[in-house]
Image (cartoon, coloured by chain):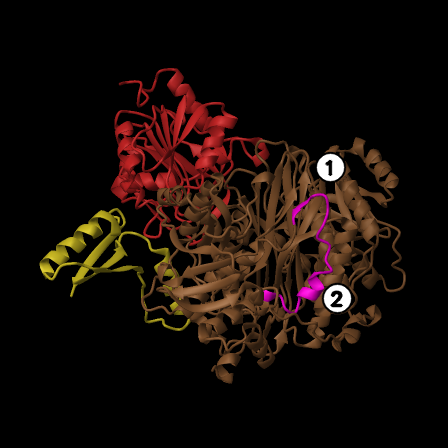
Chain colours: A brown, B yellow, C red
Amino acid sequence: MIEAPVIERHGLKPDEYDRIVSLLGREPNLTELGIFSVMWSEHCSYKSSRVHLKTLPTDGPQVLQGPGENAGAIDIGDGLAAVFKIESHNHPSFIEPYQGAATGVGGIIRDIFTMGARPIALMNSLRFGSLDEPGSRRILEGVVAGIAGYGNSIGIPTIGGEIAFEPSYAGNPLVNVFCLGTVKASDIIKGVASGAGNAVYYVGAKTGRDGIHGATMASAEFDDKSAEKRPAVQVGDPFMEKLLLEACLEVMRTDALIGIQDMGAAGLTCSTTEMGSRGGAGIEIDVSLVPQRESGMTPYETMLSESQERMLLVVKKGREQEVERVFEKWDLHAVHIGEVTADGLLRVKNRGEVVAEIPNRALTDEAPVYRRPMEMPAYLAEVQALDLDALGPVPRAEQALLALLASPAIASKRWVYRQYDHMVRTNTVNLPGLGAGVVRIKGTPRALSMSVDGNGRYCYLDPYRGAMLAVAEAARNVACTGARPLGATNCLNFGNPERPAIMWQFAKAVEGIGVACRALDVPITGGNVSLYNETDGNPIYPTPVIGVVGMLEHADRVLSRRFQAAGDAVILLGDGFGELGGSELLKVVCGLVRGAPPALDLKAERALQELLVTLAQSQLIRSAHDCSDGGIAVTLAECCFDADGTAADVAIDGVDVARDERVNVAAALFGESASRVVVSAAPGAAPKVLELAAAAGVPGRLIGRTGGDVLRIAVAGRVAVELPIHDAEDAWATALERYFARRVA
Amino acid sequence: MRARVFVTLKPSVFDPQGRTIADALHSLGYSSVEDVRQGKYFELDLATTEAAQARALASEVADKLLANPVIESYRVEVE
Amino acid sequence: MKIAVIVFPGSNCDHDAYHAATDVLGESADLVWHKDADLKGADVVVLPGGFAHGDYLRTGAMARFSPIMREVQAFASRGGPVLGICNGFQVMLEAGLLPGAMLRNRDLKFLCEHVHIRVEQIDTPFTAACRRGQVLTIPIAHGEGNYFAEPDVIARLEKNRQIVFRYTTAGGEVTEAANPNGSAASIAGICNEARNVVGLMPHPERACESILGSADGLVIFQSVMQSLKSGALVGGTRQA
């Protein structure tokens, strides 16, 4: 008989326990309770999110693998597939930033090579508290070093990402890592166990007590005792993972393998259960055969350990030696720990004695599903109201621009990405900081473009629209490199779903993602949900992060944000000025988080993206950069950076600045209206660009020329910004490193 | 027996990690910490009961692998 | 020309070197497993970048115990051209093929970016096609590339003209700011006294195609092709 406090410590509610008893037809023992607790945790079961996730679009002719496997896959031609996914490692990164982030990278890499794909690119989306706080700087330094330490060692380039800073992430940083790999579509391997009598193998690092209850930890709010949970953090070993990666890819080239899955969250429990469940089979293992790093581990600990760099394989009966030989070559020892059975049960033995026996279905299909109550948060009505007249004094445009360029969210992230090996494998054709990450596919003329985006502030102000804007921005960034967006993955970071207001944010965001993904034809092929991101009852901004993957037909026609030559035409595609709601300007310069995020017309967005792909691949434009944080003024400045000092002279006309000139000029320069892209074109090509834009129904206008060394922007006929580009670039390029030069212990 | 091997950078080699730690201590107010040198520490469990043998063995592996004589020196303790 | 690219379990630039040699330069290359004891008749040996054995103790510390390293040593002592890139350079230092050692970068951070290096010596097989003083733009990617040797060793390197590459500005000037990692004498690469063994921290194999941002690394590989063709060099197998 298990006592109520023990049940509670396992994160199970009384009615969930009753459900376990009825599914088993008896009381569980402690090992079984542990297994249920991790499989039914939010992290593994998606019990709060599942009903909403089901509404997302996941199909399309390009989709080779949708959600439900270790990662999604899309068709990229020539019989090749791109396999990708994004995943969070938020809670571990708060407790121990270096190892939390490192093992996050390790986990997502395993998800990709488990599908048979060779990982070729990593990206990440990070959120921290204000950099003025030493604690946030320490977490950022640790997270970045951890990502670098793992990715650099294993030799997969980290080709880009995004970072944002808001006080709501101070006690709950977000570390979302994305990985992409390529594989022959016909060679995709799944995490499935089938064929009674086939052998179940364990390979990789030994099992220790690390990470026990990691999955349940990731499903509970933090409190001031969280620091005591330190032992639950896993330590990564990128060298072991490199061996596993190479050895597993080599094993997959034989046809001796039925299925494979990594032991991530909930370790041996989750991998055995999910593989059996997908194959409609059972799995029987003996935990005494599992290699153990520490002595005296109980079956409970062995089943729940989250030690890193471990894989579970199902091997065809009779082919065991072949598989063992490959692992031996890599100095890995594959251990035969059990068999596939026909009875649909997860049966765990310890030296032959059964210590747990649970139907796989009870752990997976029969896991609780909640349609949790929702309620529009009370704060929304107030924060959405924005009265520009009451804004108070707005600084001069030049000052505001410099302040924005030096704000951590907009400033150059070079200090971060130079710590990542972003060139290994010699495929990176768009270096970090220049736009979406682009890797060529060797042996083809093509390249893959990818971007991860999210805007927690927008989603805080309006989760539905904010989520749509995240999808649109990720896809637009991909289109700006000249690639056609093909598919998406999402990482949904939210607070405690048991609060109706949070659940409402979640549902609205998922709805927005669905609408935008349908309109832009980027189906969701997989992803991850991270809930309970709260500390002491303070939730993070709702933060859906979207990764979009697209394809360029001609890798050598890739575009970046940089102006390429003096004298080129500067053209604005898309239209709309003056939407200041939720903007970086309001936050950085006015200290306000208010207003409605910019409106989004998805039809116009799609037309814009299709136009960009056409213009880029026909080589009519030489650079493209989307207008997002900081509006068109920041976009124009960024187009000039890293461009050998080439500035631009631009005029923005047709905006009414009459009533309150300073506010209206600021709104024109720094408003973040969606679906706008600044492109540059050779003077002779400009008319054709405008003609194609008109034909596509995309507003297009010539706004200026590149050249000179002063960035000049006139609004409604009057010069509003006149900045030596060197000064602007200096403010932007050095801002981040200045935070870390001020070394604080 | 157990042997302990302490590996440190030679005095002539600049130790940026040690310097960073010293700077951090200074900024925390420990101005009397004049310098910090960091290093590596190894515990070797040896299948011998003889101290001289243990010391010789530990020194041998330190020479061969644990320390790089170009930049590092080491010290062995046996118990 | 036949290139042997040595593969340690943690090598991760092995395929990049192989790609540059075969797909870009059209030469033949073999990936040679570190447990093998045969260079398969190679004319040139490349020790690629990566983290040979995880490098938890010191970078490159374990690689010298791999069976293939005995062959590489023998090949080098016969005058065969050997190039060590990044971790390969670190392995060479640990194996005693070249003098000195690597410390952590001056600011303790891994650094990946394009840098400028000046070719100091052109009488090595890997710089024979360069101009003396030529500045190459080539990426670095390392956490421990801060070259160290005692002053007398540095003096000897200078005297024997063994410093092959130095970090400089784009204009070829040696400055403290242009030295990315704090290396002694701004050393980016050196050779042995016989000049056939060259190690450098920057990655020429990452700079062989303009689509990657620089093709300046090509000249390193073209140099060794030219040296072999002209007979100025005795490859490992040819003298036998």
Q: Is residue C179 magenta?
A: no
What is the chain identity of the residue bearing mark 2? A
Q: Magenta span covers which residues?
A: A45-65
Residue at image location 57% in from the left, 67% down from the top: A362
Q: Note whether B40 is above or below A254 in the view shown.
A: below
Q: Tell me where residue A61 appears, x and y as whole percent.
A: 72, 43
Q: Amino acid at mark 2?
A: Lys
Question: Can the viewer see residue B27 in this picture?
Answer: no
Which of the 4 image quadrants contains residue C48? Answer: top left
Q: Amino acid at mark 1?
A: Ala
> Which numbered circle lies on residue A641?
none
- Kindly report which numbered mark, 2 or 1, lies closer to the viewer in this rendering: 2
Q: Tell me where residue A479 appears, x and y as whole percent.
A: 72, 44
Q: Quadrant where the C terminus of chain B lies? A: bottom left
Distance from Cα at disc 2 to Cα at disc 1: 34 Å
Q: Is residue A55 magenta?
A: yes
Q: Which residue is mark 1?
A: A616
Q: Is residue C130 left or right of residue A514?
A: left
Which of the 4 image quadrants contains residue A299? Answer: bottom left
Q: Is residue C118 left or right of residue A719?
A: left
Q: Is residue A660 left or right of residue A473?
A: right
Q: Note whether C177 is above or below A102 in the view shown.
A: above
Q: Tell me where residue A560 appears, x and y as whole percent.
A: 67, 42
Q: Note whether A632 is above or below A212 in the view shown.
A: above
Residue at image location 31% in from the left, 23% down from the top: C236
Count of numbered circles in the view? 2
Same-subunit check for callouts 2 and 1: yes
Q: Which residue is mark 2?
A: A508
